[in-house]
Image (cartoon, rainbow, N blue to C red):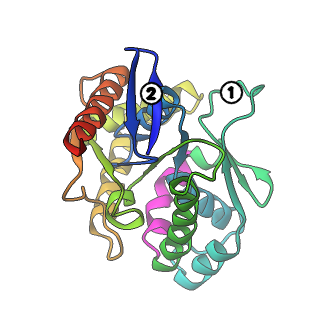
Amino acid sequence: MVEIDNAADSEKMELPRIIAIDGPAASGKSTVGFAVAQRINYLYFDTGAMYRAVTWAAMARGLDLADLDAIGTLAESLVIDISAPQPDTSDGRQTTVLVDGQDVTWAIRSPDVDRSVSVVAANPRVRVALTRHQRRISERFSAGISEAVGLVMVGRDIGTVVLPDAPIKIYLDASAEERARRRYEELRRRGKEVPYAAVLADMRRRDDIDTHRAVAPLRAAADAHILDTTGFTIEEIVEQILDLMRREEVKRD
């Protein structure tokens, strides 16, 4: 456990070192997870970026995404680094993603990667390779020997598969229409003109793949706190999560 001074309300909170946040695409988990990490001085780690990185690398190499062995071998061989942005970085990124030393932070957020990442994420060998790496990272934080006092790990199977014993588990959700609207606005802000109907269709297809894949299907952990983000601001969701943490600590006391 680590003690955090919450400047917003001037109280001390005893928080676990690991916080798991899951949810479907565009449910707000990345934005909320990043905001929570900033509030309590934890490192933010979006595990979805790793699956995107493998997808981007496979597409860049012209590999068949349906070739399980080829994509699995690629995932096992890539050097994927995820770190906090440098202080002089001002392009709005939440983390910096490197694949074999190349900065692919924005390349992995393209519509093409959006449409294909769920196929790659359903590959059993890819999941095993990346889950192993994610657990190693969490172990450093659990032991208190990493670069930050704690870790907010975000993904689709953190609370169910990667870190089933995480002390705090959050599952964020919203309707497919609301999530598609968010992704559509995000793409427009980045200068990508994609019809909303196409974004919605992609969202529904990804949801179907994610929830029905044979390995680690998307679902809320039995002991997760489920929050619907529809109609709430980021700050309101962050406050809900911090309140849940306080209540968990009261129960432990």
Pick whichever, 24 or 81, lies toward us. 81
Q: Which residue is mark 1?
A: 91
Q: Which residue is mark 2?
A: 185
Residue 38 in the image: state x and y as whole percent: 52, 29
- Whether 217 is drawn above or below 33: the answer is below
Callout 1 secondary element? loop
> Which quadrant of the structure image shows residue 208?
bottom left
Pick whichever, 161 or 92, lies toward us. 161
Residue 67 in the image: state x and y as whole percent: 54, 81
Residue at the image point whose x is 54% and y is 24% from the top: 189
Q: Is residue 141 left or right of residue 9?
A: right
Name, please, the residue furthest toward the front: 253
The amino acid type, in three-letter code, at marker 1 is Asp
Q: Is residue 178 left or right of residue 141?
A: left
Badge 1 crowding class, 10 Å Cα cut-off, few under 14, some 14 to 19, many 20 or more, is few
Question: Which is more foreground, mark 2 or mark 1?
Answer: 1
Residue 77 in the image: state x and y as whole percent: 70, 75
